[in-house]
Image (cartoon, rainbow, N blue to C red):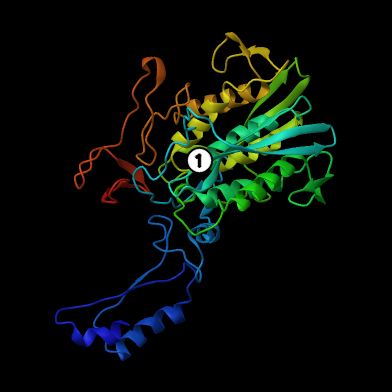
Amino acid sequence: MVAAVAPYVDTSISKTVNVPADYPYSEFEDLYMVAWKSGLKGLATYRPNSVLGSVLSVSGTATPAESAQKQPQDVTIDNANRRLSIGALPAPVLASLRWPGRPRMADGNAAWTYMVEAPHGEFALFVGEIANDMGRNVPFEVWVNGAEQPRGIGAVAKTLSMDMRANDKAWLKLKLDALAKTQDDDSFELPLPPNGERKLVPGVVSALAQVVRYRCEKLGALEGAEATPVIDCMFSRDEPKTGTDGTLSWTVDVVNPAAGEEFVLGLKEITLPDGVTRPYSVWLSGHYPRALDGLTRLLSLDMRVLDPAWIGMKLRKLLNYAEPLGDFMARVPGSNKQQNWPSTVAYIARLIMHRYAMLRILDENGYPTREMGILEVPEQKNGGVKVMQGSLCGECGNYTVIRKDGCDFCSACGAVGSCG
């Protein structure tokens, strides 16, 4: 292309060729020979590295979501403490995420209902719908109802509702795929819509995901290659793997005498290029409601969104999650005070929030200690302390300069400052 255009350019013209990190030297050398033989006056190549990351990561005609899935994860393991570290971060634009708050509708809204026939009883699954700007109904929330619903399934629906309102179809697909693979103690056959065809599902969480996916597909809510603001902000789409040498985890024991639950909550953590350690996966082990495996899958994906305001928002929404006869007394994380917690889910959310506070990423109320400029942070209630913003950018004038890959980087305009 450059060879065809160059003869008609009076001054100069060049082309940057993006090559993979493992590009053979012989082919690398041949690039310049081809350029020279074609009469090009200049040629540049770019090879991804752990400091600057990669400019492009595209395979064929993949969608942005598919491209994100195929990006190589630059993950290494520290020899001292076996902690994972990642060498490259995405560069999302300012305020590319939006707060998935529930819209207020004075006249109410329609909801699609389906009865889920689980081994331990039936419960109703609702998908709330609202008309978009084109007058077409789109799903925006999920909830469950019924005395026989499994414990913890309502928290899965609550968290999934926030993902429905994130304006990212690929993100919603990713969450539904994760839930559909969630295993339970007992698999069962579920009569799936629209014709009641019975299909074996691995558990009640998977059943919820498959029914919700059916309704979303029916409404066309998963169609189209649109912007993927949430997925573009993930520092790792797939969970980084530790290998046979393992890695450290932060763990805490959880006991709910009211529900007879006793288990271990664990967080796997990773070090980002700016030196900050972040949780990237949450797991449970012991005696707990198996529906919570679906919740941990959702939260693990939320943890890998670059802006911690995202996971902070999710955790705050779960603090008031209540269950009948599921409240209990337990110590407030980080203090010696005892407090009544409305459910095991609420206590899990508070424990995760406390770990983020220990790492100085969120405060104890779940708000980020430093605004990144990716997602606008709402004002805290009760006169909370205002979060610190980034540094002043000399290019665009916004206070959105953060440390990225060891350099000053403006998340608003993309300007790169001095490197450390």
Q: Quadrant of the N terminus?
A: bottom left
Image coords of residue 110 (percent x, y): 58, 36
State the residue lying farthest toward the bottom.
Answer: 37
Task: Assess disc 1: are there few (<14), some (14-19) or many (≥20) residues with their C-alpha within 10 Å of its C-alpha.
Answer: many
Establish if 215 lies above or below 28.
Answer: above
State the residue lying farthest toward the left.
Answer: 10
Say which quarter of the image contains residue 148. Answer: top right
Is 369 displayed left or right of 248 in the figure? left
Is 181 displayed left or right of 279 in the figure? right
Establish if 349 lies above or below 82.
Answer: above
**Residue 239 visible, this angle:** no
Residue drawn at x 54%, y 29% is 315
**Residue 287 visible, this angle:** yes
Q: Nearer the viewer, residue 165 or 113?
A: 113
Q: SS for tag 1?
A: loop
Establish if 141 lies above or below 37.
Answer: above
Image coords of residue 371 (percent x, y): 36, 34
State the residue lying farthest toward the front.
Answer: 107
Q: Nearer the viewer, residue 255 or 206?
A: 206
Q: Nearer the viewer, residue 25 or 34?
A: 34
**How many numbered callouts?**
1
Residue drawn at x 70%, y 47% is 210
Which residue is labeled 1 in the image?
165
Image coords of residue 180 (percent x, y): 70, 47
Q: Nearer the viewer, residue 88 or 108?
A: 108
Q: Amino acid at mark 1?
A: Arg
Image coords of residue 61 (percent x, y): 50, 70
